[in-house]
Image (cartoon, rainbow, N blue to C red):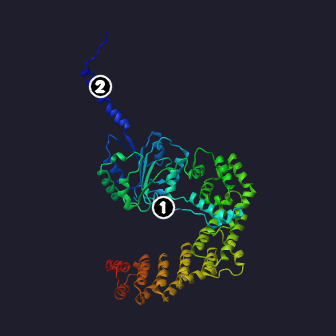
Amino acid sequence: MPFTMPALPKIILLAAMLVSVWPVAARADRKTVCTITVNSPDEKETFRRRLPSDQFQFVELVEHGRPDWLASACRKGVRCDVLLVSGHFDDGDEFYSDRLDVRESLPVDEMERVSCSDSCPGLFSQLKEVYLFGCNTLNPEAVKSASAEVARSLIRSGHSPADAEQLSRALSARHAGSNRDRMRQIFKDVPVIYGFSSKAPLGPTAASILDRYFQSGVPGDIGSGRPSAKLLSLFAPVSMTVTTGLGDRDPQAGYRGDVCRFADDRLSTEQKLDFVHRLLNRDMAEVRMFLDHLEKYSASLGETVRRDAPVSTAIDRITRDQPARARYLDFARDADRPAVRARMITLAERLGWLTPSEKRVELIRMIDDQLARNDIGSADVDLICTMNREHQLDDMLPALQAAPGKASGVGHAGILACLGSPDGRTRILQALLSSNDDDVQVAQVYLRHRPIVDVNELRVVANGIARMSNADAQVRALDTLARHELSDRESLDQLTRLFPFARSVNVQRAIAGILIRADYQALANPGLLRVLRQHRLKSSDGKDLIDVLIHRLQANLAAAA
């Protein structure tokens, strides 16, 4: 006869068994909250303090002192249900810290590489929610848009003007590259991504709002994969918003596939170059929109990599594609912005479509086209000075100067000065003393690249500033001179003599700014101190640079007594 246990002992035994396995089951069911803390820990600590420890476990992915902390988490088999990222994100390129003792950061390029390569499939495979605590993390503003030459290229390729305009809008939407778009592409298929459309609150403020959220008794929303209306309402005054990760049926899915071909570690260099070749055979309007990616990838191919036989063969296939080359260079020459044209010329050289001598011809042609315009501004001057940082383009000057009608304006003179023209430089130094804002701005940009080092030039400029009658223009010129940290005594004396005659407190402040940056200790004397005290104009907004200078001069004179 089989043994049967009475009902009550059965119940007691079953209860004991459930109690013994319950802690294990509870631990197994806990959700993992992964944190990437490169700046403020306030948000993380609030989540940790408020979430029940029997339901949530926390893993900090950043390991200080080691650069491969993300790979380390992969090797450990970490699987995240929730991800908290905390860091400044102002420029949209990386999460970073403002603390000097923190060296770790999280570049968006690295996030894209991990996402596209699927190199750590377990880490984020079960993500339900992402919290991006940083400014502009979900800013929807477009970074790129199709410019006028894109529509012209579409018309040349056979589209009607109406179709070209419609396609330009579609390309702008597809390649907008907003922070929100990039985060949706990185966190593919994640149902809830929280972030900020503009300025985010500082860590302590965000923690305070989170505390109010948890006090409302809704921790069950965390890790559910459903957006919390309560959380969004509490953070609404500080621009919190929510979106979802990109899905396979999303209109942007094809674009993500293209972008991932540049970042996917599973593809060989030869395979990536074959994709680049196919891309270069698309409509040049679309090639233009991929210029950032093409530049970055081509620049990453060092000489050692290029010498590898399969890679060399793949590059040669691109180099020998003359139809693609012709269409590309036609598009580059038609670019509205010289900066884009210069970038496309550089890329053409990397692709083997331009020899060094052919590149030189294209650059001369580009600069000649610039000089033929009437609307040259400081951005154009900045471009040429940047390109000629090492004076490698100075030998182009004779070819440019041979053309009549050049250097008719300050912008034209600035371009020629960037290429080493003495006459252009003289005109730029004169423009610094102008009452025209645009002319002064051109001079300021040029002098950032080619500062005044000759004492005679410095004295001429200082004397000219002292004679200026327009106070606003005088301040701009003085501020430009202040960046040179003057040490010439004659120039400093000239500006010091201007102080009593200045009719604007802003002019006096600008003079004080120059003297503070200069060797004011050598200038320290009772006469200068007396001039500053007696002739300083009253300030309506409290202490300023003049007070700082007076205080320092007093301290130096007292120490010398």
Instruction: State left or right for residue 245 relative to residue 536.
Output: right
| Amino acid at the residue labelled 2 | Leu
Quadrant in which the C terminus is drawn: bottom left
Work out whether residue 358 or residue 219 is closer to the camera in this orientation and state it. 219
Work out whether residue 309 or residue 239 is closer to the camera in this orientation and state it. 239
Q: Which of marks 1 and 2 is in front?
A: 2
Q: Name the residue under label 2.
A: 14
Q: Residue at x 34, y 33 (%)?
A: 24
Question: Picture coordinates of residue 177 (x, y %)?
Answer: 54, 58
Question: Picture coordinates of residue 348 (x, y %)?
Answer: 68, 60
Q: What element carries label 1?
A: loop
Q: Is mark 2 on a helix, strand or loop?
A: helix
Q: Where on the picture, by quarter, is residue 158? A: bottom right
Q: Which residue is drawn at 37% across and 80% down?
A: 546
Work out whether residue 492 or residue 406 is closer to the camera in this orientation and state it. 406
Q: Which residue is drawn at 62% across and 65% down?
A: 340
In the picture as drawn, the residue positioned furthest to the left comes out as 8
Query: In this rendering, does residue 442 appear at all?
Result: yes
Question: Picture coordinates of residue 428 (x, y %)?
Answer: 58, 80
Q: Which of marks 1 and 2 is nearer the N terminus?
A: 2
Q: Residues within 10 Å of mark 1 (few under 14, many from 20)?
A: few
| Up/down of 21 relative to 111, above or below | above
| Up/down of 36 relative to 522, above or below | above
Work out whether residue 209 or residue 90 is closer to the camera in this orientation and state it. 209
Q: Distance between the residues labelled 1 and 2?
A: 60 Å
Q: Name the residue under label 1.
A: 91
Quadrant in which the N terminus is drawn: top left
